[in-house]
Amino acid sequence: MEDKQVHAGDLIVSLGGRTGRDGIHGATFSSAELTSESESLSGGAVQIGNAITEKMVLDVLMQARDRGLYNAVTDCGAGGFSSAVGEMGEDVGAEVWLDKAPLKYDGLSYTEIWISEAQERMVLAVPREKWDELRELCDSEGVESAVLGEFKPTGQLHLTYHGETVGNVSMEFLHDGRPPVIRDAVYQPPETKTLSLSENASSEHHGESLLKILGSLNVASKHWVIRQYDHEVQGGSVVKPLVGPMCDGPSDAAVVRPLLDSQRGLVISCGMNPHFGDFDTYHMAASAIDEAMRNAVAVGADPSRIAILDNFCWGYTDRPETLGSLVRAAIACHDVAIGLGTPFISGKDSLNNEFSYFDDGGEKQTISIPPSLLISAMGQIEDVSHAITMDAKEAGNVVFLVGGTKDEMGGSHYCLVSDLDGGQVPVMDVPVAKATFAAVHEVIRGRLVRSCHDLSEGGLAVAACEMAMAGGLGMQVDLSVASDQMAIELSDTQWLFSESNSRFLLEAPASAADEIAEIFRKHGVAAAQLGTMQAEPVLSVKGQDGTSTCLEVAMDSAKRAWKKPLDLQ
């Protein structure tokens, strides 16, 4: 079967959910400026999903694919049938019988049927001789199917409703008739401001800052929402959203086994930090990719077999400076994906996310979303028994810091909770990141590592605290070792809270330390054995002088701070 090739004479077949008014103008709503009237005018823009129907449609599609029952398939995303059929029939032509579409209820106009974005619907190009077999397959799985028309070699998109023509336009005009829109995109990154940090911050100050970061909404426990959803379907969850002896540690990524008779696993992770966009959207986008990648690698994913997706949320892109910030982020996505060999396989955008209102003085005010990019990663793990979690496992194990720490405090959570402005935003070094991911994967795959946690929001201090807290243990860290072995001059505060990219904490048996260090040397990756796991549940960090304590926090205090924002004790 040719890959997604529509042939003249193929039937246009709809599978799955019925068409309703939910989702009318969903795509236009998601990219329109919000006003006080948006809720009443666009209440139907949000589609009503049905996960059970979606799973049944997926089962049919996979069987139909394996039996060669269709020539092409696409989903009903933005624009519903209009975009699905319009795109599939571009090189041929299509005749659509809108009255044949299964409806959720009576009363829809043919226009609403054509553009509704109701969920769980797929459109297939099905050879006539395969239709009966496909219909029987759908019936056997309880999935509704219907013939909506035929792909015809007319070069026209012809719509009918109860035998009457309600639309007719040439495919050439539909796809190429509109002149391309040309807009100006201008971007000037803000000047880097000097960040003033206390040179001799006390252990008490560092401890208070750590607790504030743990209690900030971006870092605090998400178990209140995680436990509202079933992540145990069919028992295929290998690494769950919450890990550790008490099942309350923040997992870096999820690992699931889609086929229960196979050891192969699917790894799902994400990365996002809009605060970096206040400094430079290029580095924000690069850092989001880095975080999604390292989260996946931290549980055992093969970095050479990871694909990523983007989700852009931006302001009003008709403004040259706003469009410029979007273009700059897209350039970063291109550069990093090429450099890592990690393809973008899909994504979405929601633009013009702004809300206008009039203040008490009658002046129009506008609130715009900050430039935000979520990167989702999907990886593979050859054998799920090799997957590891982030919770500390055993007192006496050694702790490695992997990756270079830099003076990159711009946009950090330390600055956010301290109300500080300025500093250098984290900059991703793509070749170094690629080598680091490969080295970490090698030590995990070699079963040399007991736990692994990426360094992201809050830096080393938060990562060490989360790892120890999740395992019900403590950790002792010596920054003088990291400073000596990595030959980097930083203050204790920078070592603790910098959010430089491509870094991990690894826990390993002492007997494996030399082999791990050699693997990192082979890959040219900075790594320092800077601490050990302790039975006493306290995070204790010695400063660069090797004697004085620059941070000490009890794990029960840390866990209370981590759960406090939503009063979930």
Image: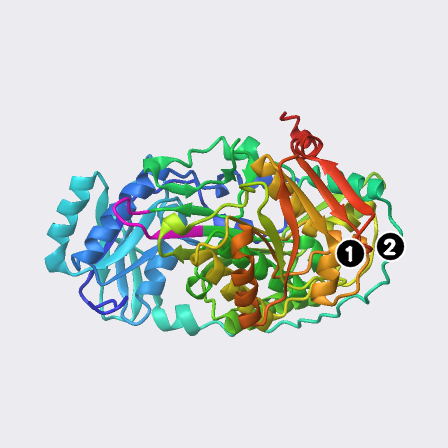
User: From the viewer's perspective, is residue 258 above or below residue 519?
Assistant: above
Residue 362 visible, this angle: no
What residue do we see at 42% from left, 38% from top? 48
Taking the magenta stretch, the answer to whether it contains residue 95 is: no
Distance Cα–Cα, label 2 vs label 1: 9 Å
For disc 1, the marked residue is 494
Question: Which residue is located at x 51 percent, y 38 percent?
Answer: 243
Q: Which residue is mark 2?
A: 197
Is 275 above or below relative to 536? below
The residue segment tinted magenta is: 258-267
Q: Position of residue 429 (x, y in %)?
A: 63, 70
Left or right: where 484 falls relative to 261: right
Quadrant into which the N terminus falls: bottom left
* Number of the label disc, if any, that sits on residue 276: none
Picture residue at 66% right of the left edge, 71% below the top: 185
Look at the numbered disc 2 and give the secondary structure of its residue. loop
- Disc 2 residue crowd, few under 14, some 14–19, many 20+, Cα 10 Å: some
